[in-house]
Image: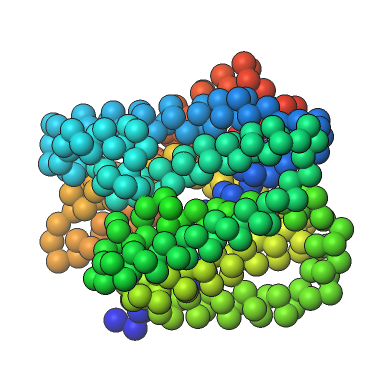
Amino acid sequence: MPLKLVLQFTARLISGLELFFVLSGFLVAGLLFREHRARGTVHLGRFLVRRAFKIYPAFYVFLCVSVAVSASSSVFPSVTLPQVVAEAAFAQSYVRGIWSHTWSLAVEEHFYLLLAGVFAWLCVRSSNPTFAEVPRFTAVVCGGCLIARIVTTIMVPEFDFWVHLAPTHLRLDSLACGVLLAYWHHYHRPVVTSWMAAHRTSFAVAAAVLLFSAAVVPKATAIGHTVLQVMQYIGHGAVILLAVYCPSLERLYCSTIGVALQWIGRYSYSTYLWHMPVLALSNAAVGGAYAPDLSAAMYGALCMPVGWVTAKAVEMPFLACRERYFPSALGGHRCD
């Protein structure tokens, strides 16, 4: 039991999904900022097409397999037509789909479209936008999300993940935080570099305090999924800045650990797609007194290999096609 509690607390402390949202905002917005700085313009059509090649082929193959297996066996969750429609339309953050993890993909998809819309509006307003409005946009989005979470909690006091944490309009602040970090990184790098060099230790302590505080209180509490949600994405944003502006990052990038992390990152999307089916198969494959332990071991052993195989079979060929017909505006092969 103590080990289980430690693992649960560690999972809340790391909160991989919250970190993923902030990091996604940082990296995806960074693509557009880099293109604007390099070329003086942003090709939003190319951006959306490239995101489509990255997301849709692997996801729709995953969806078709899920429906086929569900129709022929009881290993996967049962499927209804509204669930299939929700998955196919990327509406899972509002209408529950087949799997319990694909709601985050809907949030991401909505974010891409909103980000492209904001960039289009800024570019229409000025032929040479400075994106100085980004901090104000971030403040509005973050404030709006927090107010929406508080109002939702008042209206629906009993915690329900699909009501209080899954909807896109309650999670965009994490992604907006990443966009703000990308703006600072690409347009105010000397200032951020100087500031981080002078305050790195206190910044690390603040990040640890924020993440620890957010991990202590469960999400199911009112403060846990409202105010502490803010502390969590700010803490993860601080972690990203510490990593980006760490002097030893280049050495880590070239080390064995860095190479391993790059490999995991390359196949992370397909691994994330298939990890719940792998868990369902693991649970169905074992039985007896040690079923939970055996299932966990099987799940841990198969997740990355299955992600690698499906990425090689579906995701990577479409990315190669994308690079051939819609290459990055910045040149070079990219898997973004």
Image spot of residue 219 (x, y percent): 37, 71
Closer to the camera, 269 or 233? 233
Measured as percent of width and height from the top left, residue 326 is found at 63, 20
Residue at the spot x=26%, y=72% of the render? Answer: 157
- Position of 254 compared to 290: left or right? right
Taking the view exactly as shown, the residue that stands out farthest to the top is 325
Question: Which one is nearer the viewer's eye here, 122 or 300?
Answer: 122
Residue 50 is drawn in which quadrant? top right
Choose between 38 and 297: the one closer to the eye.
38
Image quarter (top left, top right, bottom left or bottom right) of the C terminus? top right
Q: Quadrant of residue 209?
A: bottom right
Q: Is residue 88 visible?
A: yes
Q: Residue at x 50, y 53 (%)?
A: 172
Q: Give me the residue at 47% from left, 73% from top.
A: 227
244 shown above or below 70: below
Rendered image quadrant of residue 217: bottom left
Q: Does the image show residue 159?
A: no
Q: How is the image coloured?
A: rainbow
Q: Is residue 325 above or below residue 157?
A: above
* Above or below: residue 82 compared with residue 248: above
Left or right: where 293 falls relative to 26? left
Q: Residue at x 31, y 37 (%)?
A: 87
With 101 as the anchor, is 114 left or right in this view?
right
Q: Residue furthest bottom?
A: 2
- Percent of width and height locating residue 66: 26, 35
